[in-house]
Image (tube, rainbow, N blue to C red):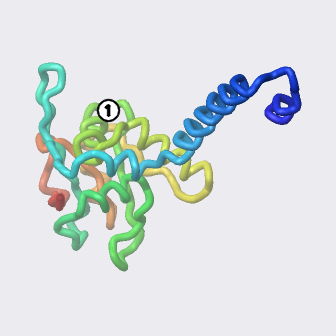
Amino acid sequence: MLAVYKQDKSINNTQRIAFSKKYALIGFALTLLLNTSFSGAVEESSSHIDESKENSGQRKESIVVITNLMTQEESIAVHNLRSIFAMRLRRWGKEDRLEVFVLPDDHPTHSSFTKSILHTFPHNLRRIWDRRAYSGTGQLPNVVSTEEEMIEKVSNTPNSIGYVTKHHYRDSAKVVELER
């Protein structure tokens, strides 16, 4: 279309400039959309983690990150946690492969976890998982239906990680402290 447009002699320079600006903006917008990634969306948020935000008059419960009791990790940096739940980081040190457990996308605890801890939205995280799974560069996390099932799976699976509200936490799993 651009080649045909440049060959048309009846169009003046003002029209050519307007055309060039219009399509340059579209090209720029497409470049921005195509170059958007999870890390950029996550890293633009502040490093402050507020685990108990107010939302429409209701106080959200605090979320804790849990691992199997046999896991050696006592704490984890938030940027590593983001990589783990984005399915980019698949091992802790030289240990075996990590098993990541998550709640369904529409679960309130999942929404709170992604927003307050990972600083992203559930649909962005889902998009990252799907892109990795369908491109063959990764796999989807293990989805459990309830927080009780999350605790059961994490406590019975070596090198596993998940999250629950403090209210649902039991001693059968270990809470990992978050490093800011």
* Left-right relation of 157 to 74: right
How many numbered markers are drawn?
1
Three-letter amino acid code at the position of disc 1: His
Q: Residue at x 69, y 24 (%)?
A: 14
Instruction: Give the camera-side residue of 141 and 85.
Output: 85
Crowdedness near tag 1: few (<14), some (14–19) or many (≥20) residues, C-alpha within 10 Å: some
Q: Residue at x 85, y 21 (%)?
A: 10
Instruction: Give the camera-side residue of 112 and 148.
Output: 112
* Left-right relation of 97 to 33: left
Residue identified by numbered label 1: 107
Whether residue 55 is situated above or below residue 30 in the rendered picture: above
* Left-right relation of 127 to 165: right
Q: Position of residue 23 (x, y in %)?
A: 66, 32
Whether residue 76 is situated above or below residue 163 in the rendered picture: below
Q: Position of residue 138 (x, y in %)?
A: 53, 57
Instruction: Give the camera-side residue of 85 and 180.
Output: 180
Q: Position of residue 131 (x, y in %)?
A: 55, 47
Q: Position of residue 48 (x, y in %)?
A: 17, 49
